[in-house]
Amino acid sequence: MIVDKLYRAVEEKGHVCVGLDTDYSYLPSAFASRFETKGEAIFEFNKEIIDRTHDKAACFKVQVAYYEALGLEGLKAYSDTLKYIKEKGSISICDIKRGDIMKTAEMYAKAHFTGDFEGDFITLNAYMGVNDSLEPFLDYIKNQDKGIFVLVRTSNQGARDFQYIKNEEGKYLYSSVGEKLQELSQDYLGECGFSSIGGVVGCTNNEEGIKLREEIKSMFLLIPGYGAQGGGAKDVVPYLINGNGGVVNSSRGIITAYKKDGSDPMDFAKAAERATVKMRDEIREELKK
Ligand SMILES: O=C(O)c1cc(=O)[nH]c(=O)n1[C@@H]1O[C@H](COP(=O)(O)O)[C@@H](O)[C@H]1O
């Protein structure tokens, strides 16, 4: 199962998920000007970062909005990036946050688990109902080695608007979502003990982190919020079980690292590599405590 591959990647390379939220404005101008189109420049930027980090990061998350925003050339860069991640033997998470039902959900599954935009994992939103929203993706998990990460408790401040509403038993909405997913995840467990039905839990607002982790024990977690959103290594640890069971995403903190560490902008990939290694080691150190 794909979750076993991700589990092994974490064992070997650490917990970092490099977020390729590649806005054109992040590219050093001297680099971007070498290419005819923005799409081409973005792909080449990603490629250099992938080359430098694929042996130090468990996986890559590619946020589709940055590519969609550029139209067809952006979608080509998205597709080429996913293919390149695969060529390098790495794992991709397509951050598409789709959430629809019936035939439409079936089409989203086909679009992002096969063909030009194929990735290993995709992110989903189960607001329309756990079974209705997720059902079309389950066959791909069982038979085609794919996985999903479903939003449970997000990293943004606005998460409090709805996710923290309590039901009559005093249970947060995010916790009810987690409970349903934990139940469903049992049919998709890998040898590592975690499920290919994973959850997204931000490493900000961690007051109830340990309790939440208890409720969704079998789910492999995608943990955003590190770096640019304020999360650090100590915020991640409550979500890991025996040092595994989660990957931690950082996007701007890695791909724009060159802007902060004073390096030559053309060395952006080396700066991304240094940021990846620093983050990987900080999490490993925190786990030892
Ligand atoms: O599903 C996600 O990836 C996600 C969930 C969440 O709760 N918070 C969150 O920030 N994200 C994504 O994680 C990335 C965070 O980017 P940085 O803040 O630059 O590291 C973006 O692609 C967000 O869309």
Image (tube, rainbow, N blue to C red):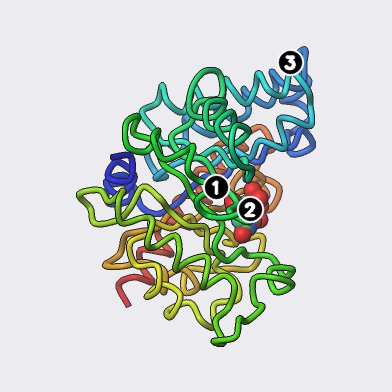
**Residue lying at 66% horizontally and 35% vertically, measured from the top left:** 64
Q: Are marks 1 and 2 in contact (CB under 8 Å)?
A: yes
- Please state, as top left, top right, bottom left or bottom right, where the C terminus lies in the image: bottom left
Q: Nearer the viewer, mark 3 or mark 1?
A: 1
In x, y percent, where is residue 32?
75, 24
**In this figure, what is the number of numbered marks?**
3
Q: Is residue 261 visible from the viewing direction of this image?
A: no
Q: Is residue 282 visible?
A: yes
Q: CA distance from mark 2 to mark 3?
A: 42 Å
**Label drawn at residue 132:** 1
Q: Which mark is residue 158?
A: none
What residue appears at the point 39 percent right and 63 percent down from the top-left corner?
Answer: 182
* Neighbours of disc 3 within 10 Å: few (<14), some (14-19), many (20+): few
Q: CA distance from mark 1 to mark 2?
A: 7 Å
Q: Secondary structure at mark 3?
A: loop
Q: Secondary structure at mark 2?
A: loop
Residue under pointer 2: 128
Q: Which residue is tagged 3?
A: 35
* Residue 97 position (above or below residue 142): below
Circle 1: element type: helix
In the rendered structure, which amino acid carries the disc numbered 3? Answer: Phe
